């Protein structure tokens, strides 16, 4: 168990003492609910406040009316309070009211008047609400602000995936009645629950070692942390996959790097609910351009880019630092596979037989593979990419889909992508072979020489002597014929052999 408060308890307690509303947001399955329950129980144990957690998710659908939502909130709050409070501190029984059309604001006022200690209300899944229900809920909370703490909760936490700046878009942003300030201007501060640090992951795994004697070595920890990026669900899922699924809770067995690698691949293949939810996000109009800029290596330059970046960070899709990149290698791999599946399944099996590209000694023949791709790309790329939703990244994804079909027969591909670097790097691991490929688009006269230099530096970092650069032309065949663009060249830079495939 990682400390759920993550060094934020004191700051939050100050806001509660100051009678403020505040916001807590984080991606799904990062510990928000654990945090809230721990906070409510601690506040109740300390004895200065009465605190409960209530989820608003049950009213998170389009067709619900404001009146029904109020009833749902009140019933949910009454039932949930039993988890946190003794009978003498419970809110009023909703059935005691003569009318079912009581407002949440009035219900909270009645409860606050009854209590001899201030009420702290922790509302989860606030951003699941839509339109008038969201606006009405926030207005009721704002309206009660002036009467706290005797007649309304002293402090309220609004909890969800996104910061309050995104609530407006959820609440029909084109509605002029919303205005530029209230009901959204009700929070004093926002808290973002970050991913686990490496030290927190180490502490989590050390607890397993103390309980079982089974050790996660430092190199295993490094690999697990590298794959999960500290994302709480992924961190636990990887460790669980190794300990329970692969080793069957046999704590005498050693946890190796190969087991972490296998666990990662199994999670990607299984695409459990947490990972499968990425598929729902990639078509979001604010998410799509950010994903495309990561895959292409271009800098995001479009109206609203800053908001789109913040939105993707709030969702946990990209990391919080710079350069902008996927939050972890597992997300990166799943998103890429989702985007390439349309290409991949359409590739004719006649050219996707892995055995055709294997030398007699079992090594992968990259020249034969890229020759085949060049021919396939020439005859199919324009018509395929033209039908593709992610056109801007279509060229890169086309090659990735082709390689994935071949390499799945006995190796794996790791990808390195980030905005602003102008390229996509792939590393193919095939038995003892480590094969580096750089995908570079032809933007201007500097693109090719710059790409060759970039790949030489990348090879130096990996300790490799040979690498491939696939140089893709943005112009159509009508603008530049295939005969003029297809070529294979070998360049030597700083004792590194760069094999260039231009097409």
Image (tube, helix red, strand yellow):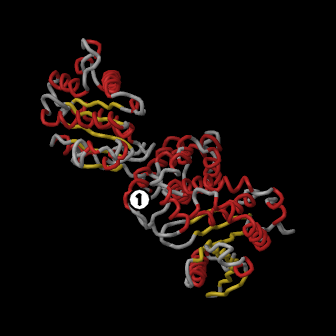
378 and 257: which is toward the camera = 378
Residue positioned 22% across, 44% down in the render: 182
Image quadrant in which you'd find residue 15: top left
Residue 164 coordinates in the image, percent (x, y): 31, 47
Relative to residue 237, is residue 319 depicted above or below? below
Residue positioned 15% across, 43% down in the render: 18
Total marks placed: 1
Residue 477 coordinates in the image, percent (x, y): 68, 73
Residue 311 coordinates in the image, percent (x, y): 40, 53
Q: Secondary structure at mark 1?
A: helix
Residue positioned 84% across, 69% down in the render: 359
Q: Residues within 10 Å of mark 1 (few under 14, many from 20)?
A: many
Q: Quadrant of the N terminus?
A: top left
As drawn, the residue found furthest toward the right would be: 360
As drawn, the residue found furthest toward the front would be: 478
Q: Is residue 139 visible?
A: yes
Relative to residue 424, is residue 138 depicted above or below? above
283 and 201: which is toward the camera = 283
Residue 368 coordinates in the image, percent (x, y): 80, 71
User: Is 36 on the left or on the right of 142, as rendered?
Assistant: right
User: Is 485 on the left or on the right of 281, as rendered?
Assistant: right
Q: Quadrant of the C terminus?
A: bottom right
Relative to residue 404, is residue 247 depicted above or below? above
Q: Is residue 81 visible?
A: no
Relative to residue 206, is residue 151 depicted above or below? above
User: Is 130 on the left or on the right of 478, as rendered?
Assistant: left
Image quadrant in which you'd find residue 339: bottom right
Label 1, on which residue?
309
């Amino acid at each position: 168990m990682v400390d759920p408060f993550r060094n934020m308890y004191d700051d939050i307690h100050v806001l509660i003492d100051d009678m403020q509303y505040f916001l807590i947001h984080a991606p799904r399955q990062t510990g928000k609910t654990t945090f809230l329950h721990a906070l409510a129980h601690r506040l109740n144990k300390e004895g200065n406040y009465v605190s409960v957690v209530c989820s608003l998710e049950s009213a998170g659908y389009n067709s619900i009316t404001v009146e029904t939502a109020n009833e749902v909130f009140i019933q949910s709050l009454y039932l949930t309070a039993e988890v946190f409070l003794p009978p003498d501190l419970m809110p009023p029984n909703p059935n005691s009211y003569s009318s079912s059309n009581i407002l949440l604001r009035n219900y909270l006022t009645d409860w606050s008047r009854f209590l001899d200690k201030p009420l702290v209300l922790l509302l989860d899944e606030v951003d699941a609400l839509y339109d008038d229900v969201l606006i009405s809920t926030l207005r009721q909370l704002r309206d009660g602000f002036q009467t706290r703490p005797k007649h309304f909760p002293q402090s309220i936490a609004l909890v969800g995936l996104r910061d309050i700046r995104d609530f407006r878009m959820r609440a029909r942003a084109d509605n002029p009645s919303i205005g530029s300030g209230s009901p959204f201007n009700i929070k004093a501060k926002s808290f973002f629950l970050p991913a686990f640090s490496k030290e927190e992951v180490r502490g989590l795994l050390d607890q397993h070692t103390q309980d079982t004697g089974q050790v996660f070595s430092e190199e295993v920890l490094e690999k697990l942390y590298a794959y999960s990026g500290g994302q709480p669900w992924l961190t636990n899922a990887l460790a669980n996959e190794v300990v329970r699924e692969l080793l069957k809770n046999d704590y005498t067995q050693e946890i190796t790097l190969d087991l972490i690698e296998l666990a990662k691949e199994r999670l990607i293949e299984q695409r459990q609910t947490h990972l499968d939810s990425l598929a729902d996000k990639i078509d979001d109009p604010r998410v799509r351009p950010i994903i495309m800029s990561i895959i292409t290596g271009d800098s995001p330059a479009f109206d609203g880019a800053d908001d789109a970046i913040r939105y993707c960070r709030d969702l946990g899709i990209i990391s919080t630092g710079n350069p902008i990149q996927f939050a972890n290698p597992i997300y990166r791999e799943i998103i890429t596979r989702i985007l390439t599946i349309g290409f991949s399944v359409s590739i004719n099996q006649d050219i996707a037989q892995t055995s055709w590209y294997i030398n007699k000694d079992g090594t992968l023949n990259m020249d034969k593979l890229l020759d085949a791709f060049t021919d396939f790309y020439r005859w199919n790329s324009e018509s395929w990419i033209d039908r593709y939703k992610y056109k801007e990244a279509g060229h890169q994804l086309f090659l990735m889909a082709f390689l994935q079909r071949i390499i799945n027969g006995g190796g794996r591909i790791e990808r390195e992508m980030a905005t602003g670097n102008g390229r996509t790097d792939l590393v193919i691991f095939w038995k003892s072979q480590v094969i580096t490929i750089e995908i570079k688009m032809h933007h201007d006269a500097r693109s090719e020489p710059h790409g060759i230099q970039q790949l030489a530096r990348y090879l130096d970092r990996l300790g490799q002597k040979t690498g491939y650069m696939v140089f893709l032309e943005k112009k159509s065949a009508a603008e530049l014929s295939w005969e003029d663009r297809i070529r294979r060249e070998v360049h030597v830079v700083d004792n590194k052999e760069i094999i260039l495939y231009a097409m």
